[in-house]
Image (cartoon, helix red, strand yellow):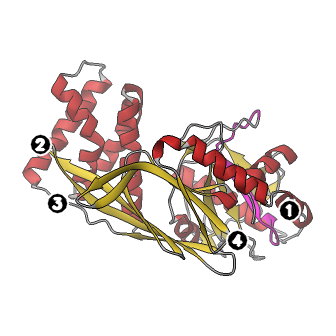
Amino acid sequence: MINKRLLIKNLLAHNDENSFYDKKRKLNLSYKEGKAKFLKHICALSNSNPKNNSYIVIGVDDADNNIVGVDFYDDSKIQNLINAYLTNPPIVQYENIPFPHLPDDKVVGLVTIRPNNKITSLRKNIWKYYGGAVFFRDGSMSMPKVFDIELKDVNSEIVSTIEHHARNNIELTLNGVFDFMKKREDYNPQYKVFKEYFVLCWAGQKKEVNDEVFYSRVDIELINEQRRLFYSALDEVSITYSENNFTIVEYVKLGLHNSYKYYKLEETVIKFENNASYSIETRLLFEPPQFDKKVLHHIYNSNNALLEKLKKGLSLTPNESLDLKNLPATYLICYLNDFENAIEKLEEAKPLLKSYSQSIYESYKLTLRILRKVKYN
């Protein structure tokens, strides 16, 4: 099994960007331009490496290889994007890899593109790229190829060597467990060994409600791969496990006028097999709450007025400051109740909330995460 943190270090130390490896400061898959550029790189790396894995490392400064990290990204539907826009799509996996020097809410994103030995092309137009376009890697650049298309295997040996040097061992596993238990000692850290092989660590602030146990500030890591499977700073999460499975049910708190309720958002089941493999299955459980439209119209207009005051740099009253804390969640509720323009307002609010309050901006990011999951399904 490959230790993904060690693999990233080997990629950064061994090579600059090339035909089997790319690095990015961040990805933005919320907009067409970001999606298009991501698909271009996936297409180019797949075509340039028909018989070996290729990688994109996200959260690295391009100039000096400094690992700065990105937000945890848990979108299990990224393969749907690949399949929708690429012909002969490769299998693509996005993983969140924690590094000790990064803050708790930051990771390095690792995108692995599995070889398929077929020519991959854009299935349809997106942004400024046309359907049918084929991309290859030319050094560190993903370039269109119009003629003489041929798949060549030139990287298998070097990629195999890099992956071999990143293999896990008992020392790395033990160090990973000790590091996790020490770092998360204030959040009830625990571990369990599955199938005498996989070591899973998790931690969270424990809370009991009506004989049920919930956790917040949850961190779950598969130590064998140094891979973070789940992270949430705000949500309530229930955790159950058996000899073969580890199950997470995530809840979100939504409501109006200081009347809130917890709603199931998503279930994640990690299944461990006897052949030293595992799978992760996610299922959306969310049923959007419905509210009175007249009340929502009032809240929607109030939110819009708050944004205008922030744009103009005007001071907020105490009540308006309280409403601003709830603005991301109430815009989400409006969207879930057929206020289509609420998404545009959320996008408009991003820079304003980021500069106004870090805690409100964290709530904004959680809201976008919920929205992304709902839209994909």
Question: Are there few (<14), some (14-19), or many (20+) residues within 10 Å of tag 1?
Answer: some
Give percent across and percent down for residue 235. Answer: 37, 51
Query: Magenta region's main secondary structure?
Result: loop
Q: Residue at x 80, y 61 (%)?
A: 167
Q: Amino acid at mark 4?
A: Thr
Give percent across and percent down for residue 107. Answer: 60, 46
Identify the element where label 2 is drawn. Answer: helix
Q: Is residue 61 magenta?
A: yes
Q: Are marks 1 and 4 in contact (CB under 8 Å)?
A: no
- What is the residue that sits farthest to the bottom in this orientation? 274
* 100 shown above or below 126: above
Lower sequence index among marks 3 and 4 = 4
Range drawn in magenta: 48-64
Identify the element where label 4 is drawn. Answer: loop
Q: Amino acid at mark 1?
A: His
Lower sequence index among marks 1 and 4 = 4
Q: Quadrant of residue 179?
A: top right
Residue linked to disc 1: 164
**Mark number for residue 120?**
4
